Structure formats: C-alpha cells, structure tokens
Image (cartoon, rainbow, N blue to C red):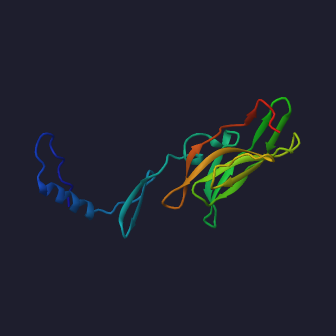
C-alpha cells in the first residue's frame, strides 16, 4: 500500500484521501528509534519523543556542576537520582560539604530533591541530600535548599520538572 499523494494547496481534498491515509497508517508497523519511542496497547499506538542524549537527559554536563544530577534505573527497576558533590558556603564562617555522590530513590510525583543540614552543624561538617513529594522548607532546626523537582512520566520514569538551584549554595549572611 502506498501513502496517498500530498494535497495540493488551494485545491479541495477528496474524502477518499483521508480514508486512503488511514488505511496506509494501519498497514505499517512503527518501530522505536533513538529519537522516538513507540508503544502499542489496547488504546492504540503512542509515539513519544526521546530526549537528546547526555547525563540527566540533556547535553548539559550535569556531572561537572556542584550538586549536578544524573537519573538512572537500577536492577530492581527503581528510579535513582544521583546528586554530585557540592558545598554550602556560609560567608565569613566556612563551608559544609557533600564530598561524594549521594543517591535518592524517586517514588513520588512530584519528587523534590534538596540539600539539607542542621543549623547546629559545625563548619567543615557535612550536608545531606533529601527528597520528598512536597516542596521542602527550612525549620528552626534544619536548613533545606531545593535543588530540583522531578515529575513522574506516564511510562513510569521521571523527567526534570524544575531547576531550583545551580551550583554551590552561597549564603552572604550566616544562617544559623
């Protein structure tokens, strides 16, 4: 079966053109590619654009950025967000650091990923990476700085929904 000829601008389109196009589309078997994912189910066929390659789903070098991220799926089919090392710099006091990659398992929708530390943490101490389904807020005991919000996709994966902070966290006034 051949695809029908393209309609000519300014000329009427015969009703048979639409029927021929539908017949053609039903006769082909679409396949996934590097840029398009094809899923066929009871409700029909779905075409989904795949993001350009690169860490974190884009060509941006997230692995070079303080508190950058990478998304992956482990052997148990859990969605893992890895946050790369970074620091919270307290002007005139010092810094608190995340010295190696930290992983959190994404389960909610949306899923907020944030850096946090206790206000009582000594300079030179460590920060941790947390996650929750509601936007994180600081308390009288803990400082929480949102880094990213990830949104669940229809296929069960996650996509970057919002960038809340890039790079090391800087506080000009000590937050204690």
- Numbered label tally: 0
Quadrant in which the C terminus is drawn: top right
127 vs 37, left or right, is right
**Residue 168 placement (x, y as % from top left):** 72, 37
Quadrant in which the N terminus is drawn: bottom left
101 vs 53, left or right, is right
Q: State the residue in front, 56 or 2.
A: 56
> Measuring 54% from the left and 58% from the top, which residue is drawn there?
157
> Measuring 61% from the left and 56% from the top, which residue is drawn there?
72
108 vs 44, left or right, is right
**Residue 143 placement (x, y as % from top left):** 76, 44
- Within the image, what quadrant is residue 107 found in? bottom right
**Residue 52 placement (x, y as % from top left):** 50, 46
- Within the image, what quadrant is residue 108 found in? bottom right
- Is 141 above or below relative to 74? above
**Residue 121 placement (x, y as % from top left):** 86, 45
- Is 53 above or below relative to 93? below
Q: State the residue in front, 130 or 67.
A: 130
């Amino acid at each position: 079966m051949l695809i029908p000829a393209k309609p000519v601008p300014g000329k009427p389109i015969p009703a048979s053109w639409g029927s021929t196009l539908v017949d053609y589309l039903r006769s082909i078997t679409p396949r996934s590619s590097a840029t398009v994912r094809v899923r066929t189910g009871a409700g029909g066929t779905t075409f989904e654009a795949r993001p350009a390659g690169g860490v974190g789903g884009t060509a941006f070098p997230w692995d070079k950025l303080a508190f950058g991220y990478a998304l992956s799926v482990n052997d148990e089919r859990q969605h893992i967000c890895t946050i790369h090392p970074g620091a919270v710099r307290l002007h005139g006091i010092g810094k608190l650091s995340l010295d190696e990659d930290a992983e959190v398992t994404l389960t909610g929708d949306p899923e907020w990923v944030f850096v946090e530390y206790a206000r009582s943490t000594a300079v030179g101490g460590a920060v941790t990476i947390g996650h929750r389904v509601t936007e994180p807020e600081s308390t009288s005991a803990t400082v929480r700085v949102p880094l990213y919000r990830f949104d669940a996709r229809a296929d069960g994966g996650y996509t970057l929904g919002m960038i809340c902070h890039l790079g090391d966290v800087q506080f000009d006034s000590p937050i204690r």
